[in-house]
Image (spheres, rainbow, N blue to C red):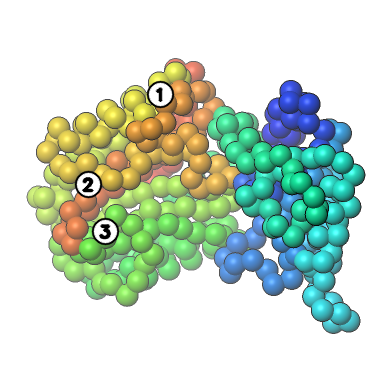
Amino acid sequence: MHTEQRDRAHDLLRSRNIDRALFANPYSVTWLTGFAEPLQVGPGPFAGGPPLVWYEDGTFTLLVLESLDTSSVSIPVIRYPGYTIETPLPGPAQLTKIVGELVGKGEFVAEMQALPAGFLPPRAGPLPIDGWLAPLRMVKTGEELAKLRAAFALADVAHIAAAQAVRVGAREIDVWAAAHSAVQQQGGQRIPFGNDCVVSYRENNIGGWPGDLALRAGDSLMMDISTRVHGYWSDSCNTYYAADVTPRQKAMRHTAAEALEFAISLVKPGIPANEIDRRVRAFIAEAGYPVYPHHTGHGVGASSHEEPRIVPYNATPLEPGMVTMLEPGIYFPREAAVRLEDAVLVTADGADIMTGHLKRPLY
């Protein structure tokens, strides 16, 4: 499992004559091993720290709390106890001891930004390697694509439930709960779930957590949904209407749909990410609408937002195997909003749409 990912990381480290490394970024850990720490209620009270991956002489080893399920992991695992009634909770001391024994044998490099300071030896710190794996993560393996397709399929289920729950009088939280419930029933387990569920009359109607705000006739509801399956995140967005669509809403949705289809048509190997961003923003502006203040899109994988970012500063050229979200929108605070979002896989000759919640033709 995730052998190809580890081979890429191994080749990178060897090319820089590095024999020992400690990976602490949670997305690096998932990308290297397939292991994803459970989410929903925050860090467990018994963990001594985040899951870690130790690399030495070509071998990757996962360091993790003993109570977590590592049955899908195909590399060596070092587990430590985090709970006992005989002593104070031992997790932090146990994990610190394990890390100290590993790194104390000589020089090493580490993802420093996610590494608790107490794990470091009392001497000059290791060379930081934060961000080294991000470029490798952009092009997905076949195994990663299968996980992403499963996550996107669950997001599609969420959108079906959301569409059925939207009606005059329903609150944001009602629609959100219906969508999340449908996902977990379909998945047969607890499923991490995000991102936005906002009525159009909010002051900030670009995004936010659902609340006790009811839909009225003439309102719309924007649902931006992510699900995590096997450690990999989906993303998606659609805008729903509480009653008959008004002429203004129809015109805004038409333009957003055209902008999304235009963005997808631009996707091909070699095009810089910021060229897509520039041209889609220009499309919205030429249609007479205010240009959205957020990204035009972003990568998705072990993290719900990763490279390549489709933003003005990023000139990274697209490559086959990249998966990117595209999400143009139009917003009038306290009045009206629309955003539509699809995931596309960059192929040798264009783009393959991976999400299924938006039914074509879009307009």
89 or 159, which is in the foreground?
Answer: 89
Q: Which residue is mark 1?
A: 272
**Amino acid type, residue under disc 3 in the picture:** Asn
**Amino acid type, residue under disc 1 in the picture:** Pro
Q: Which residue is mark 2?
A: 330
112 or 328, which is in the foreground?
Answer: 112
Q: Is residue 324 left or right of residue 358?
A: right
| Image quadrant assignment for residue 146 | top right
Measured as percent of width and height from the top left, residue 191 is found at 56, 60
Residue at the extreme front = 123
Decide which of tag 2 and tag 3 comes sooner along the chain: 3
| Cα–Cα span, label 1 and label 3 | 30 Å
- Residue 260 higher or lower than 197, as above or below: above
- Residue 232 higher or lower than 135, as above or below: below
The residue lying at 40 percent from left, 21 percent from top is 271
**Amino acid type, residue under disc 2 in the picture:** Ile
Residue at the extreme bottom = 85
The 10 Å Cα crowd at callout 2, few under 14, some 14 to 19, many 20 or more, is many
Measured as percent of width and height from the top left, residue 26 is found at 64, 50
Measured as percent of width and height from the top left, residue 235 is found at 45, 47
The residue lying at 81 percent from left, 60 percent from top is 96
Report the mark closest to the observer, 1 or 2: 1
Decide which of tag 1 and tag 2 comes sooner along the chain: 1
